[in-house]
Amino acid sequence: MTVDDSGPVSARPGRRELLVAAAMAARLTWRAAPLATIAYGLVALTTAGVPVATAWLLKLVIDRLTADDAGAGVAGPAVLMALAGVAMAMLPQLGNYLRAEIDRAVALAAEDRLYGAVERFVGLANFEDPVFLDRLRLAQQGAATPAQVVEAGFGLLRGAATLVGFIGSLSLLNPMITVLVLLTAVPVLAAELALARRRAGVLWQIGPAERREMFYRGLLDSVHAAKEIRLFGVGGFLRGRMLAERRTANRARRRVDRRVLVVQGGLAVLGAAVSGAALIWAIHAARSGQLSIGDVSMVIAAVAGVQSGVNALINSVAQAHEQLLLFNHYVAVVDAAPDLPVPARPVELPVLSEGIEFRDVWFRYGDEHPWVLRGLDLRIPAGVATGMVGLNGAGKSTIVKLLCRFYDPTRGSITWDGVDLRTVDAAQLRQRIGAVFQDFMEYDLTARENIALGDLSVLDDPERLHTAARRAGVHDLLSSLPRGYDTLLTRLFFGESDQGNPETGIRLSGGQWQRLALARAFLRDRGDLMILDEPSAGLDAEAEHELHTRLRQHRAGRTSVLVSHRLGSLRDADQIVVVVDGVVAEQGTHAVLLAAEGEYARLFRLQASGYQPEGELVLEPGRG
């Protein structure tokens, strides 16, 4: 795999985008650390003036030492030179401290704004888009750059002030050398800006390779993958894939580093040649009496100062340019348009009393993807339990995502008591829904926090938490833990000395985690809709029977959607919907669907046959 390190168009924003990014960086820095920013600016200006003053003081000291009345009037300039030396020693330390303070404050504010923007995304589409994930990763790096952009700006100011001082000094001695030194800055500036664009561009280009590298690394150090990796002996294979992606990224970086070496090496030779020419002229002029010894020292200091100032100026411009290119990804995420339409005046969502209706709903995850739902018509009546079955890929999980408005239909509509879901506030809708997803989360938090995430308003309400846990059949387990509900359900945060100490955290089994996820959903029992997507997939037969008994009691008279591949767990649902190729193929009660001898009957008997002795017929009560 080859990576073009020149950078794509999206990694090279125009002048307007860079100005917007610079303005945002400045605002973030000023709001996060105004006093430290002012102090850093004063330090930068003082640091810029001290070298110029020192050079003039040195010239004055040398001239007085070599004058006829040698040594007369030397004490004053010498003391000032000593004070300048103290300032030059102290100012960088103070600047480093102030810069660190600014970095910390700005990074905190920028990260808060970045993840606040991510939280405002209504749906899931961005998190399933590799291009967006690459941009988000660069935006996370960019969250640390506003202070660096401002620092580069102060560096620009400091370099400019130093440069002006030394240019004025050198031009008094030899205007031609001054012009020559400044002319060398033109190729340096052009080269550094090109290198800055190249460095920023390669970060964007190697994003996919780095993402794949992180994926393989995550497998190699994941406890979830450890069993299969060791059983199948695929660790070496995955490590090879990980290292191959790293080599791909390294090759791209190496090409940029080689370009930097060649370009900057050539520019350094050019600068040395100019300095040498200035030194030869100064020595020749001193021998001919055109310059004093102090003037020679001033020429040497001024040439070095001009070159240093030019380089500092160019480095600051290049650094600011590179940081702005990276920060532009941050700006793109923070200022991103809503991933789903947000109504200007949301309609109030009524209490669900009639039902939810899918009307000719078509949906696909992108223009290049196949249709998942193909004109689906479905009614979920209020107050009843609706079971949903179908083969993998039939569209069941997509229906659940649309119910939660993680996506909008490509065509058609979904209404809640006649109100289109696109016209209501998504947060209000989700407050009215409780759900257990098949890929439920296992949070590295305490048991109490794991449940309370379902409704943070009850975080300090033990009775509500215990009630939800009892309904999920996990209260006794949590109560028996070393610290009860305040036991950490992870070993992630502890060191070697804590290993084996249950007081510092424990691990649950998959089935126990599933019960915890159910308890989290049960906190929303005052909502209008409960969605249970494979709620018993990780449970044993006894636990599954107990759970479904509890669920039947809980959902009585409530609106619920139960998705499961275990058809026996759906047989008591008020209605069962069979989804085939993105449409409702059958609908009815368990008995009606069995009598119809359609897809449901075929799947039910196929599953039931696995529990019967070979050759024994699977019969339903009342059927011959």
Image: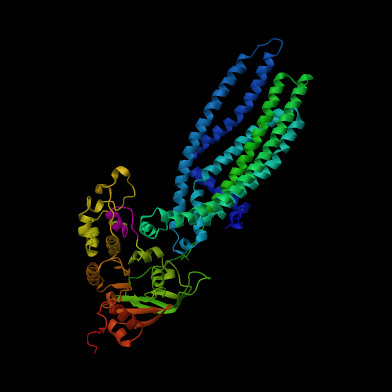
Position of 452 with respect to 173 (left or right) is left
Image height check: is 500 above or below 608? above
Q: Is residue 401 left or right of residue 446?
A: right
Would you identify the image quadrant in which residue 62 lies?
A: top right
Residue 391 is situated, as x and y percent measured from the top left of the image, at 38, 76
Seen as rendered, the residue at the extreme top is 69
- Please, what is the dominant secondary structure of the magenta stretch? loop
Residue 434 in the figure: left or right of residue 318: left
How many labels, in total? Answer: 0
Residue 523 at x, y percent in the picture: 28, 62
Does residue 445 belong to the magenta stretch?
A: yes
Part of the protein shown in magenta: 441-455
User: Is 539 in front, or is 526?
Assistant: 539
Q: Residue furthest right?
A: 288
- Residue at (55%, 33%) from the top-left corner? 42
Q: On the rendered image, what quadrant is the N terminus found in? A: bottom right
Residue 296 drawn above or below residue 593: above
- Residue situated in front as seen by the camera: 328 or 503: 503
> Between 273 and 433, which is closer to the camera in this rendering?
273
Residue 72 sits in quarter:
top right
